Amino acid sequence: MTSVRRAMPKDAEEVLRLRQVMIDSMARSDPSTRWHTESLPVLRARLAEPEGNFAAFVVDHPERPGALAALVAGTVDYRIGGARNPYGLDGSVFSVATDPDARRRGYARACVQALLEWFRDSGVRRVRLTASSQAEPLYVSLGFRRRPDPLLELTL
């Protein structure tokens, strides 16, 4: 059985390392890590808020003490309710990453399941994510389904 735990402030550097693993796997990504310096204190502070709207779940690396094998992060966002989601609480999953030498062991699945349980405990009734074609089978096996909704984005 995989031991998943909530990430703590002491994990922040490893969380950023695994986030960069995910970023580097995406097409047209920026491989720069200069942003880590600015992001690290913010991430540490967010990981120290056990009752906040952000959570990260991790698996410790079995062969490298102090390193993480897998990560998933998510947030609870409020939107005005609607017919399918009257309370308006949406979960967003992001930064799902597994260290390259720890893949195919079920770590990402275990982390996502822990995050989904946190969402349920937080009153979330709808969870959304963007998946790569390689990761989509994992999410489909957990009950996610493809939506036809187009996504538009604006960078401010």
Image: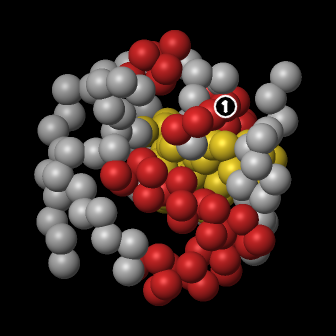
Give the amino acid type for the residue marked by disc 1 in the picture. Tyr
Residue 57, compared with residue 20, is above or below; it is above
- From the viewer's perspective, tell me whether residue 102 is left or right of residue 81: right
Image coordinates of residue 14 in percent, x first then y, are: 63, 62
Image coordinates of residue 71 in percent, x first then y, are: 61, 47
Question: Does any portion of residue 136 appear in the rendered image?
Answer: yes
Residue 134, compared with residue 6, is above or below; it is above
Q: Assign the N terminus to one quadrant of the image.
A: top right
Q: Residue at x 45, y 51 (%)?
A: 21
Q: Assign the C terminus to one quadrant of the image.
A: bottom left
- From the viewer's perspective, tell me whether residue 65 is left or right of residue 148: right
- From the viewer's perspective, tell me whether residue 3 is left or right of residue 117: right
The image shows a total of numbered marks equal to 1
Q: Which is more toward the observer, 29 or 42?
A: 29
Image coordinates of residue 110 in percent, x first then y, are: 69, 30
Q: Residue at x 62, y 70 (%)?
A: 13
Q: Residue at x 34, y 44 (%)?
A: 25
Element at label 1: helix
Residue 101, compared with residue 78, is above or below; it is above
Q: Which is more toward the observer, 98 or 156?
A: 98
Colour convention: secondary structure
Question: Does any portion of residue 49 appear in the rendered image?
Answer: no
Image coordinates of residue 41 in percent, x first then y, are: 60, 85
Residue named by callout 1: 107
Q: Which is more toward the observer, 76 or 100?
A: 100
Q: Which is more toward the observer, 70 or 143?
A: 70
> Few, some or many C-alpha atoms within 10 Å of disc 1 (few <14, some 14-19, many ≥20)?
many
